[in-house]
Image: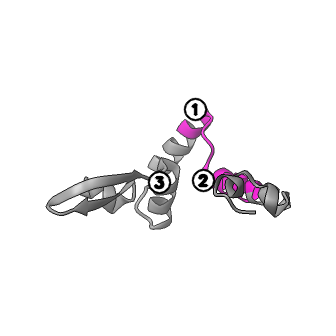
């Protein structure tokens, strides 16, 4: 668990004497991209990972970030009082 946290694949929070009460899983694409940015992933490993992403039709980190930006643009175009998240929270 500590190694996964150190490499950026999980985050955890303990309570009392329990070290791993809550564990947050980080999307593997984000974690691997961070490792690559930090220079901890070899070119050969990175190439194999990217090839596997293509095989499985998994979006790359850049594609995921672009989709996130596009979704934010769409949400910003919806009038404030009509956003589903605001209605669920009881806001207007």
Magenta span contains residue 3: no
Asked if the residue at tag 2 contacts the one at tag 1, i.e. Cβ–Cβ closer than 8 Å, the answer is: no
Number of other residues with Cα within 10 Å of mark 3, as a class: few under 14, some 14 to 19, many 20 or more: some
Asked if the residue at tag 2 contacts the one at tag 3, i.e. Cβ–Cβ closer than 8 Å, the answer is: yes
Task: Please indicate whether residue 44 sits to the left or right of residue 2 in the image.
Answer: right
The image quadrant of residue 51 is: top right
Please tell me which residue is depicted at 80% across the width and 63% down the height of the picture.
Answer: 80
The first of marks 3 and 2 along the sequence is 3
Task: Please indicate whether residue 88 sits to the left or right of residue 13 in the image.
Answer: right
Residue named by callout 2: 61
Please give the range of residues in magenta: 52-71
Tell me, for residue 56, which label it has, or none.
1
Q: Position of residue 42 (x, y in %)?
A: 43, 55
The image quadrant of residue 8 is: bottom left
Nearer to the camera, 15 or 41: 15
The majority secondary structure of the magenta stretch comes to helix
């Amino acid at each position: 668990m500590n190694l996964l946290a150190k490499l950026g694949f999980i985050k955890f929070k303990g309570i009392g004497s329990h070290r791993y009460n809550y564990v947050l899983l980080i999307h593997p694409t984000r974690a691997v991209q961070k490792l690559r940015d930090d220079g901890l992933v070899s070119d050969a490993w990175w190439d194999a990972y990217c090839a596997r992403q293509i095989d499985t039709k998994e979006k790359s980190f850049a594609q995921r970030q672009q989709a996130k930006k596009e979704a934010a643009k769409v949400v910003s175009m919806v009038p404030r009082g009509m956003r589903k998240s605001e209605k669920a929270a009881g806001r207007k």
